[in-house]
Image (cartoon, helix red, strand yellow):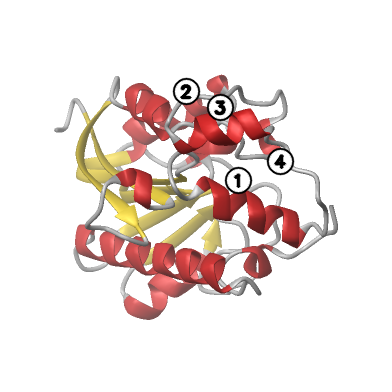
Amino acid sequence: MREISYDRQTVNSANPLARYAHRSRMTMAVSLVTRLCDERATVVDFGAGPGFFLHTLGQARPDLALIGHDPYVTPAFAEVSYAASLGELARGSVDALTAFEVCEHLYPEELDALLADAARIIKPGGALVISVPIMYGLAIGPKVSNWMIRGRTLKSEYSPAEMLKSMVGIRVPRPANLRVTHKGFDFRELRGIVGQRFAIDAVHHSPMPHVPWWMSSQYFMICRPLALA
């Protein structure tokens, strides 16, 4: 597949449906985190990429301390500082830890490490905010079509049977390499794993927040460490 920058795949996508979905996701992310943070709070974004979310958040809330973590991407915004790892952050030092569009690419041991770090660094009363793609229900057709158009290919990683299963919520297997695909990712399984360590205070769907999850494309969870819930 040809290389396309992250912003051209998401908030600046040539596909109007994809662009709308990702801009709606960004708007919801900024709104949720803003409401969670008191004045001069500290926000850490895990898998921050070049820092676009934190930059956008900082425009709405210039009082916040913004810290990103992403070992694979060069930072692009001067107001965002970067941590080499969550392990270097002090216990109880973070008001909001975000993980947007990243958990679907983590292997089990990496997800376990993220949740352990989150429980350690989040302040009493703080929150872990996660967003992940919804890969089941009505959104799967437009998503797969968009990937094929973007990659200029008629081939899909989904078979026709897998597409039908995904549309009705039946799980399909995940590929071995989770880094480069969303195929088969199930937010319901992630929610069960997160729920073992965190109380899930609220869930939200984007870009259609007032309809069932299977009619939307993104799933948000606001989570509190169980010891602090």
Q: Is residue 7 above or below residue 155?
A: below
Spatial CA distance of label 4 from label 1 is 23 Å
Nearest the eye: 123 or 177: 177
Nearest the eye: 130 or 67: 130
Q: Earlier in the sequence, mark 2 or mark 4?
A: 2
Instruction: Mark 4 and mark 1 in contact? Answer it, CB < 8 Å.
Output: no
Spatial CA distance of label 3 from label 1 is 15 Å
Tell me if mark 4 has few (under 14), some (14-19) or many (20+) residues whose alpha carbon lies within 10 angstroms of its own: few
Residue 78 lies, in percent from the top left, at 58, 74
Amino acid type for the residue under numbered disc 1 = Ala
Residue 70 lies, in percent from the top left, at 61, 49
Q: Quadrant location of residue 62?
A: bottom left
Residue placed under numbered mark 1 in the picture = 84
Instruction: Mark 2 and mark 4 in contact? Answer it, CB < 8 Å.
Output: no
Q: Is residue 107 above or below residue 181?
A: above
Q: Earlier in the sequence, mark 1 or mark 2?
A: 1
Instruction: Mark 3 and mark 2 in contact? Answer it, CB < 8 Å.
Output: yes
Q: Residue at x 40, y 74 (%)?
A: 58
Q: Which mark is residue 180?
A: 4
Residue placed under numbered mark 2 in the picture = 112
Amino acid type for the residue under numbered disc 4 = Val
Element assignment for label 4: helix
Spatial CA distance of label 1 from label 2 is 18 Å
Instruction: Mark 3 and mark 1 in contact? Answer it, CB < 8 Å.
Output: no
- Foreground mark, 3 or 1, reads 3
Q: Earlier in the sequence, mark 3 or mark 4?
A: 3
Spatial CA distance of label 3 from label 2 is 5 Å
Q: Residue at x 22, y 57 (%)?
A: 210
